[in-house]
Image (spheres, rainbow, N blue to C red):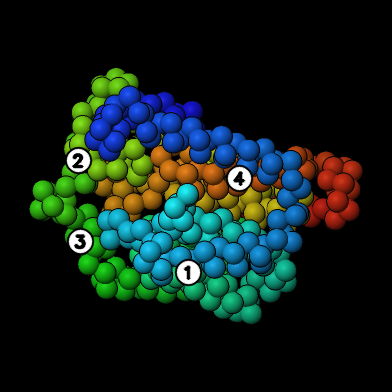
Amino acid sequence: MALGSIMLYSVSPILSQKLTGSAAANYFFVNQLKYIVVGLVAWVAASALPFWRWRQWAPWLLGAALLSLIGLMIPALAQSANGATRWVNLGFVSFQPAEALKFSLIIYLAAWLERRRDDLRTMNAVVPFSIIVGVICFIIVVLQRDMGTMMVVALASLGMYFVAGIRWTHLAAIVGVSGLLGWVAIVTASHRLNRLTTFLNPSNDIMNTGYHLNQALIAVGSGGLLGLGLGKSLQVYGYLPEAASDSIFAIIAEEFGLFGGLAVILLFAVLGYRAMRIASHAPDAFSCYLASGIGFWFVIQAFINIAAMVSLLPLTGIPLPFISAGGTNLVLSLLAAGILVNISKYTVREGSDENRRQRGRVGRPHLANFGRR
């Protein structure tokens, strides 16, 4: 988050001049500071709130997130950009319902998987799981027209089920059906199909459909090993679209070079590793699934964003967690990170015979070595 603030301070004057007509406004940096303050409050609150409370609230959170999607169907409230309808503007604040849906679904699935522990390797759990996640993904693709967020939701959910213990045959079947439905979603939407054809041939139509990808590659390539230096980006002068949000990694690579880009990747790798460590020593099934789901969310979203900037995946338009400009993703990511911190307060060391009541003070049984897989 500190790195993101530095980068936004670097690019904000130029982008603010273009947006507001005044470089001194520092619009993007000042806006991000407001979101950071709100997010830190959420992080502290979630760090102090016992994790098992989220189990009780899971259905209500998912219901509220689904209800917020209605705003995308109201033309006066919905905002569209780059072929996707992602924001609901209430006048005094705008937010992305899919981000809330992503957060609430991870909590709901953690509680759902815990309740179905005895059936997880049977079709009695596989079919309902596929329906739940499939419906959520369908809503995101249809209402928001947002393939990137759908991929994060689908892969994070599948990762949680893998941790819970899905059969390989069931996993292969879900992946196969999901891939087929994903292909249908791509070929039935012109903006997704354009992104796919641009990915397959980046040099085709570089001034139109291939413009964004080619400018991102120019930014990454221009950085060399050590970069041009902080504040010396050239792509930010109106060349690279979404330089403060979805394309922020390309600016990082331009200003800090290959080593700077690798440092960002390493940070996300460490974050994912720590989340999995917390999950592996979690005190019960719910917290294990929840911690792993949050870890998958952060790492998968970062991977998709970075891979798109270096042409390993088609452009998707999702933010880089904790770094990109934007309020909804940052606040909810910090809220999720706070939940991880709280779960870590109750983790049990491997080989420890200290009981669950003494460490967690919640009176629930400890599942020894639960997350070893």
Tell me which amino acid carries mark 1: Ile
Q: Which residue is mark 2?
A: 215
Q: CA distance from mark 3 to mark 1?
A: 28 Å
Q: Which residue is mark 3?
A: 194
User: Around disc 1, counting alpha carbons within 10 Å, would you say few (fewer than 14), some (14 to 19), or many (20 or more)?
Assistant: some
Nearest to viewer (mark 1 / mark 2): 1
Tell me which amino acid carries mark 3: Asn
User: Around disc 3, counting alpha carbons within 10 Å, would you say few (fewer than 14), some (14 to 19), or many (20 or more)?
Assistant: some
Q: Answer yes or no: do the residues labelled 3 and 1 have beta carbons within 8 Å?
A: no
Residue 190 at what x, y percent from top left?
A: 22, 67
Nearest to viewer (mark 1 / mark 4): 1
| Residue at 60% over, 68% down | 63
On the question of residue 372 being in view, the answer is no
| Residue at 63% over, 61% down | 61
Identify the element where label 1 is drawn. Answer: helix
Identify the element where label 3 is drawn. Answer: helix
Tell me which amino acid carries mark 2: Gln
Q: Which residue is mark 4?
A: 335
Q: Earlier in the sequence, mark 3 or mark 1?
A: 1
Identify the element where label 2 is drawn. Answer: helix
Q: Quadrant of the C terminus?
A: bottom right
Q: Earlier in the sequence, mark 4 or mark 3?
A: 3
Q: Quadrant of residue 152?
A: bottom left
Q: Earlier in the sequence, mark 2 or mark 3?
A: 3
Q: CA distance from mark 2 to mark 4?
A: 33 Å
Residue 83 at what x, y percent from top left?
A: 28, 61
Residue 240 at what x, y percent from top left?
A: 23, 39
On the question of residue 46 being in view, the answer is yes
